[in-house]
Amino acid sequence: DGGITQSPKYLFRKEGQNVTLSCEQNLNHDAMYWYRQDPGQGLRLIYYSQIVNDFQKGDIAEGYSVSREKKESFPLTVTSAQKNPTAFYLCASSLQRDLFFFGPGTRLTVL
Amino acid sequence: KQEVTQIPAALSVPEGENLVLNCSFTDSAIYNLQWFRQDPGKGLTSLLLIQSSQREQTSGRLNASLDKSSGRSTLYIAASQPGDSATYLCAVPGGSYIPTFGRGTSLIVHP
């Protein structure tokens, strides 16, 4: 089956700890994205990548980092610099200018 | 900068009603618009994609229309069912073809 997978489904972070969220797609899409979703708010773009080995900051990139070493993978690291990381994180992919597909999400909670 | 507004923010209806969800956007120079559904704690599922050259798209009991000149799209749900209960989001592309999302309409269909 083609699609996007995210792991883990739930993640807990201690103060001062970096954590990495995984996103993998087998749709052969060029572009991949990370969004953050908070209750009562819309989706906010963290980072996006339109081609391997290249990525761009979105609206709320501070405290986050990404890499795009392979077409199918776009991991997101939430660093200790992100002071309010508790949220639902969604990964998406698309062919350029076409349908967007989303993964099932990772819920991150700070302990 | 593209801004997307969805009205109403929440809707509660009895089963069987026909519904209209509204989406408006500020920059009418779009090449498509996509409607999504999100169940609690889940990722987004694509419902319909309307290209800028189209006026309507239909899938089962769902019909989406697009009026670029007025910056509006509507999602029509016929004969609503409890299983339709979810949050519905619309998205339109902005700079670099990155979609901007509305905050969604939270729909509850009660038996």
Image (cartoon, coloured by chain):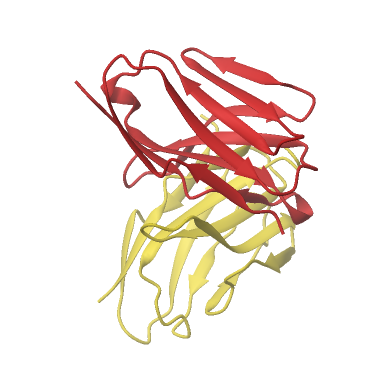
Chain colours: A yellow, B red
Q: Quadrant of the C terminus of chain A?
A: bottom left
Point 64% across, 66% down: residue: A58
Q: Nearer the viewer, residue A103 or B26?
A: B26
Percent of width and height locating residue B44: 47, 41
Along the horizontal axis of the image, is A91 left or right of A70? Answer: left
Percent of width and height locating residue A76: 53, 66
Point 58% across, 15% down: residue: B58
Along the horizontal axis of the image, is B60 left or right of A61? Answer: left
Percent of width and height locating residue A35: 53, 58
Q: Nearer the viewer, residue B88 or B17?
A: B17
Q: Is residue A81 above or below residue B68?
A: below
Point 63% across, 24% down: residue: B65
Q: Is residue B21 above or below residue B10?
A: above
Q: Look at the image and tell me whether residue B30 can be seen.
A: yes
Along the horizontal axis of the image, is A12 left or right of B63? Answer: left
How many numbered marks are there?
Answer: 0
Which residue reaches farthest front? B70
Percent of width and height locating residue B81: 30, 19
Q: Look at the image and tell me whether residue A26 can be seen.
A: no
Quarter of the image for residue A66 reads: bottom right
Point 57% across, 79% down: residue: A62
Q: Nearer the viewer, residue A15 or B106?
A: B106
